[in-house]
Image (cartoon, grey):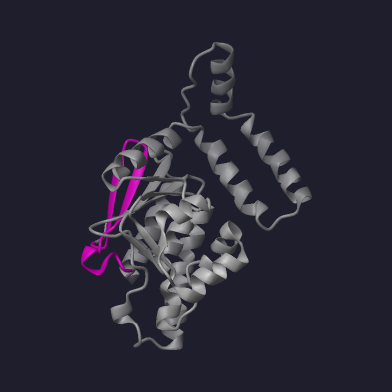
Amino acid sequence: METMHLLVEQSGSVLWLTLNRPERLNAFSPEMIAGLTRAIEHAAMDDAVRAIVLSGAGRAFSAGGDVKAMGQSSASQAYEHIGRLNRLIMTMKSCEKPIIAAVHGVAAGAGFNLALACDLILAAEDSQFILSFANVGLVSDGGGSYWLPRLVGPHLAKQFFFTAEPISAHRLYELGVLSKIVPAEELREAVEALAAKLAARPTKAIGKQKRLIEHALTATLEEILEEERLIQGLMVETDDHREGVAAFKEKRKPVFQGK
């Protein structure tokens, strides 16, 4: 599963996926996108994986699209490339395992949007985010036009996209886009702690809750109420539910197995 542009490592029940083009600030390549898609598809079906971390090698999380390769693509080539990126984004959102983005350095363009497609974002305090598409005469790809207005509102999203000005981690934390910011030297430790915590939670319930929240962005109240009703019928028959109830009655910490 590991490719030259993607490092794959499993530590316990946490799968670490590291973008690995440090000489290009982890700008996307077709190989990287395909590798990420395959890795997350596999993780979604692997009971041994209960949380996923996405990070970048070297000095940055990701610069997004490879600017050095731009200006040479035809409309059809761009359409095909973004189709592959779209498949990755949809794979991430349909994966019923929590995905954490660990951001340091720069997250630019589609690299920023890749982080937004994760369920939680932890970032180094000195990291910078930039929706740089307008600087090269492009619009957002990778779902930023969907995520950002829902997180910060349409007017602020327009400002970020139109001006392409860098946004600090502190600003995004205040806006609720980032889950936590820590000193750069503490990022790995903070991500490991959160990933371990999520991996120890009831995986099936976490996955279904992720699905409910995503659907709630476009569903009616009636649709969500019925979906909650149907899913809860499945959850009450899981081993983790039984363990949670037993632990509560016995006044002890539950030991979930993700089943």
Give the magenta range: 4-27
Q: In the rendered image, which quarter contains the N terminus? A: bottom left
Rendered position, 35 above or below 251: below
Residue 101 pos. (x, y %): 40, 51
Which of 199/151 is in front?
A: 151
Q: Is residue 10 covered in magenta?
A: yes
Rendered position, 188 above or below 172: above
Q: Is residue 218 left or right of residue 120?
A: right
Residue 166 pos. (x, y %): 40, 66
Residue ID at (43%, 81%)? 78
Q: Is residue 103 covered in magenta?
A: no
Residue 79: tell me if it is visible: yes
Residue 193 pos. (x, y %): 36, 35
Residue 238 pos. (x, y %): 58, 30
Name the residue at the right extreme: 222
Residue ID at (47%, 46%)? 179
Residue 118: tell me if it is visible: no
Residue ID at (44%, 48%)? 99
Rendered position, 136 above or below 156: below
Q: Is residue 131 left or right of residue 57?
A: right
Which of 198/10 is in front?
A: 198
Q: Is residue 28 left or right of residue 139?
A: left
Rendered position, 35 above or below 120: below
Question: Residue 167 sits in which quadrant?
Answer: bottom left
